[in-house]
Image: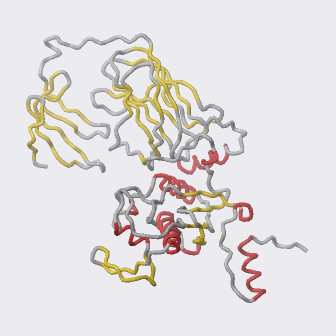
Amino acid sequence: MKIKNNTLTEEIDRIKSLIGFDFNYNTITEAEEKLEIFEFGESYPDNIAYPVTQGATTKNWIDNLTPDLNSFINRLKSKIKTGTKIDKIKIKSGASTDNANTEVPTGYNLPLVQYSYYDPNGVDTDVNGKKIKVKIDNAVLAKRRGIIMRNILKKKLGLTDDNFELNASGNKKTVIVGVPATTLINFSKLKDYVKPKQIYDPKTEPNIKVTKCNSNINATGSAGKSPLYIADKIKLDFQGDGPVTFNYNSYAIPDRFVVRGTKDGKTYSMIKGGDTGFITSLSNNDPMFKGLESELKSLFPKATLTGGKGSGKISFNKEPGVQYTIFVYAPFGGTYWGASLKCGEMKTTPQDNTEEGSKVKDDIKYNDKGDISQDGKFQNGKLLDGRNFVYDDMGLLSRIEIWKDGKNTGEQATL
């Protein structure tokens, strides 16, 4: 006779029906349930139940989640999109054993603290003109942290309450999330894992500027933003033209390094041999390699992961008038990488001071999306008299500046 092997949850339900009464067994057990455990401890300041960055409010908190949680959600979302079924996520939440209070942590606000202590059995409290029930108690805070984490994952991943089990018995200000062990790789087990410090937005974040040859470049610990997952942009901002070698080291967590050049504001073009593809120092036979490869393909279906090749170099010739930028793609959170630049003999291209070079010319320039960036009269490649088009983060035209004698007049043209 073939005996069915029940899961732990099924066995608990079977015992409940046999003994005739209910009991609590919500403790996350990695060994028995074969869960991969992700801990979000640094996401929670004192008295805050929301895993959000400083400056978040009760109205915009869902759009200001911490970088490590954002990265975790993006990875789960990509797995679900490619067919991975997640039947049960276990959440264990906690709070400090210190006396509960409503002290507001630096960078946060009182309404967020008050909502963190929301409890149906609490005292009516006015919060921004609205009455809510508040109970200042660590048990309430611990429970709220678990509930809010569940609600975030429900909203972001399209799951239901049935996909979760909650347990609010922890005595630390953490939330531990357990997902089926084969779903995600837990990078915290790798020595070169760095918790992401920020979500990098290429449209708003400054580039890493390299102003000298023969210099080292350090990782920032940024997490890439969906859908491209660009985590850093390195701009070569030094004088001279000649041979340049970009040495890189991705270590274990996959990265991709791409060198692009642009001239006169034209669209970025690929440098020949300037794309490493996604690489890792882990060999193809490493137990974690297959999991990494599977996760990468859930984000980029056509991408390949090259193992045993975490380091290497890209060599190119820095040409006159070309602006070079190195893009670092990091789809797995706060990746750690290292790089350095080595330059051969740099030659300074003399400025064109001839009558032809300094002549005023009518021209139109475009940005990397093909939209007009400037039009009018130019001298030595710079806008002298004309219009400067400014776009917002969504790529929409926000204003048109009027320039005269090479300066912004402060006036704006009608959109």
Instruction: In this rendered view, identify the residue nearer to me: 156 or 178.
Output: 178
The way the protein has been coloured in the rendering is secondary structure
Q: Is residue 174 left or right of residue 370?
A: right
Instruction: In this rendered view, identify the residue nearer to me: 407 or 414.
Output: 407
Residue 120 percent location from the top left of the image: 45, 83
Residue 209 percent location from the top left of the image: 37, 30
Q: Residue furthest right?
A: 1
Q: Residue furthest front?
A: 99
Instruction: In this rendered view, identify the residue nearer to me: 247 or 26.
Output: 26
Q: Is residue 59 left or right of residue 257?
A: left
Please tell me whether residue 16 is drawn above or below residue 79 in the rendered image. below
Q: Is residue 158 visible?
A: no
Residue 319 percent location from the top left of the image: 36, 18
Q: Residue at x 19, y 32 (%)?
A: 364
Snapshot quadrant of residue 268: top left
Residue 298 percent location from the top left of the image: 56, 51
Please tell me whether residue 180 is drawn above or below residue 131 in the rendered image. above
Q: The N terminus appears in which quarter of the rendering? A: bottom right
Q: Residue furthest bottom?
A: 20
Q: Is residue 370 visible?
A: yes
Task: Tally the numbered discs.
Answer: 0
Q: Residue at x 59, y 62 (%)?
A: 177
Q: Residue at x 54, y 57 (%)?
A: 40
